[in-house]
Amino acid sequence: MKKIVILPVLTVLFYLGINQNSMAEEKKTYVPETPELKSNVMTPEVLWSFGRVGSPELSPDGQTVLLDVTYYQIEENKSYRELYTIPVAGGELQQFTNTALKESGAQWRPDGKKIGYLYAENDETQLWEMNPDGSEPKQVSQIEGGISGFKYAPDQTHIFYAKAVKLDEDIHDMFPDLPKADARLEDDLMYRHWDQWHDYTYNHIFVAEYGEGEITKGTDILEGEKFDTPDKPFDGLDQVVWSPDGKKIVYSCKKLTGKAYSLSTNTDLYQYDLETGETKNLTEENKGYDKSPVFSPDGTKLAWTSMERDGYESDQTRLFVMDMATGEKINYSKGWEQNAAHLSWADDGETIFFISDIHATDEIYQLTLTEGKITRLTDGVHNYQSVVETPTGRLLAAKVSMSQPAELYLVDPNNGKDEPLTSVNEGLLDQLEMGKVEERWIKTVDDKDMLVWVIYPPHFDPNKKYPAILYCQGGPQGTVSQFWSYRWNFQMMAANGYIVVAPNRRGLPGFGMEWLEQISKDYGGLNIQDYFSAIDHVAKEPFVDEDRLGAVGASYGGFSVNYLAGHHEGRFKAFISHCGIFNFDQMYVTTEEMWFENWDIGGPYWDKENKAAQRSYSFSPHLFIEKWDTPILVIHGAKDFRIPYTQGMGAFNAAVLRDIPAQFLYFPDESHWVSSAQNGILWQRVFKQWLDKWLK
């Protein structure tokens, strides 16, 4: 591998208007130089200059953390990811890769003597290894077509790797005499999903012996099966685990295809035995999601997360543990109405640490198996994203907030206090004035208590009057927690000079199952009233100009904006709807995850006897277009298959036909999100430009 020097942040100097001569001459070796900013408030260019910390992993001896940091080069419109280590005891980050391509999937070899990682050359990704200091990189695999992931067996005798296997015929297989034909011929559903067309391949897991020689092939444990593990498009190798003795593999898989796949969330855990080649379904009785398996250190128990109801992707995520000898399963979430995620075992094999959302924050919890007791360990205005025990008893955790991107922390489980281990973005954060984030509890129309985040502009002056924007969350069951986003960034919105009102309306987790489940089949019901309750409450403040209110949101939040446009009774002066549903009838027959539509909407629009479904369709925003009278910016990506871009076109076209001021920001290469640097910056600029035009 030829090594080149990459300093991503330096390439944004032109955009930031930074004086390069004012930068400190002394360079840190582990991050690009921190530029000196001309302004101390957030800008889109600064937002895209933060380093993104990811994939922390403890070394086998528990003394060192392996992680990666990704930076974006705005001029090149691409990202660079490098690998780092830092001692658990504290110290400087040590960068040990510096390449033109992104290393990924880095992990410690079980003996701690090597770090394995994925690296692509000539458009083919293979397994490489290097010493922990980055020296002596060596290619380990030579798998035809490349691989997409791997894991070492704990006893280091095998590895498994993930690879795409072509099992379906494409148009050229069917008609080989037409090599230049460009078409698809479909006969079932799920031919596209979220942002990818089915490419006639399936993700499979292969097992190969690991030793001194180069790995060239392995045994496909799903030989001939037209199923994916990891599941497309979002699951990773956290859904596939080795048993501690290296003799078995447990993986999550939804063994359904086509229409059946589109209607169900029934994902099970399967155990593959390396010696016998036999596969066993461990969770056949459960009809919802079964995911994220984690073996106890001695291999006698398996923990995982489970949803009970088929077709309900936002059901309670329960914490289950199985005795591997007897097959007995215990639901430790029984009687507890929160979700469990990011499970990790303590070394004692009797304690599980995990993350759960509670009142719009994500906190660290502990399950003690002997007592069956769940205990909350942390409490603060933040989101923890992962947790694992270190040999000292402290917990290694990634943490974010509305005011800070992810960094690694060490948490004392006895008192919940944490201290930073990494400070990748300290140089930028120290130069920025963040807006105050305030927690408010307000009354809803039915006298319930609702948590609302209010984010103030930097340098807030209570004697001034500010415009305010209502943030409408997507999901619809996605919590408005202390997340840090590179698109819907609350500090970025506040830095534009707006009060941001972000309610945890009906339909969000962290406030009990009744609050969560109210929204299904009732999109135009109480959760819409919750929006009004939130904005009306904050609009009464003397520092808010109630004549300059806007509403913004994406996905379900985009639907919310489209719906509010026909029901807001003059409250708002500007709207921004990103990838929002406009026409429920067309949404039902052009989306892909039918389990979602059937659960949340209630079924197809042609089922006239289904009163719940018919009520849902009565909320379709297109039915209220005659009431639209407010300027609206509509944003959509062509590769959004979850909510097809024609929904955005419909909203925009209808607004123009009604002589309502409107703009349509269309991204041919983006999906349900905006993921490239320059598109992301463009999004932020147009977002601000539109609100400033109508609210300032």
Image (cartoon, rainbow, N blue to C red):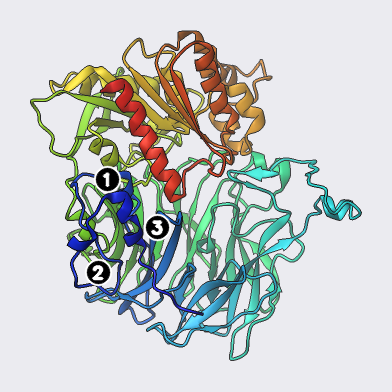
Q: Is residue 465 left or right of residue 236?
A: left
| 1 or 3: mark nearer the eye | 3
Query: Real-space Cα distance between discs 1 and 2?
Result: 25 Å
Q: Which residue is mark 2?
A: 394
Q: Quadrant of residue 224?
A: bottom right
Across and down, in percent, residue 361 comes to 29, 45
Check if mark 1's residue and mark 3's residue have beta carbons within 8 Å: no
Of residues 695 and 600, the one nearer the viewer is: 695
Q: Label 3, label 2: how many angstroms apart (C-alpha)?
A: 32 Å
Q: Residues within 10 Å of mark 1 (few under 14, many from 20)?
A: many
Which quadrant of the rendered structure holds the C terminus?
top left
* Kind of residue at disc 1: Met
Q: Taking 146 as reference, is 329 left or right?
A: left
- Helix, strand or loop at label 3? It is strand
User: Residue 338 is drawn in which quadrant?
Assistant: top left
| Image coordinates for residue 680, horizontal then vertical, percent | 42, 44
| Kind of residue sitting beneath label 3 | Tyr
Label 3 close to label 2 by CB (< 8 Å) = no
Label 3: few (<14), some (14–19) or many (≥20) C-alpha neighbours in 10 Å = many
In this view, 502 is above or below 527:
below
* Residue 615 placement (x, y as % from top left): 54, 16
Residue picked out by circle 3: 72
Q: Closer to the N terminus: mark 1 or mark 3? A: 3
Circle nearer the N terminus (1, 2): 2
In the rendered image, the vertical position of residue 493 relative to residue 273, given as above or below: above
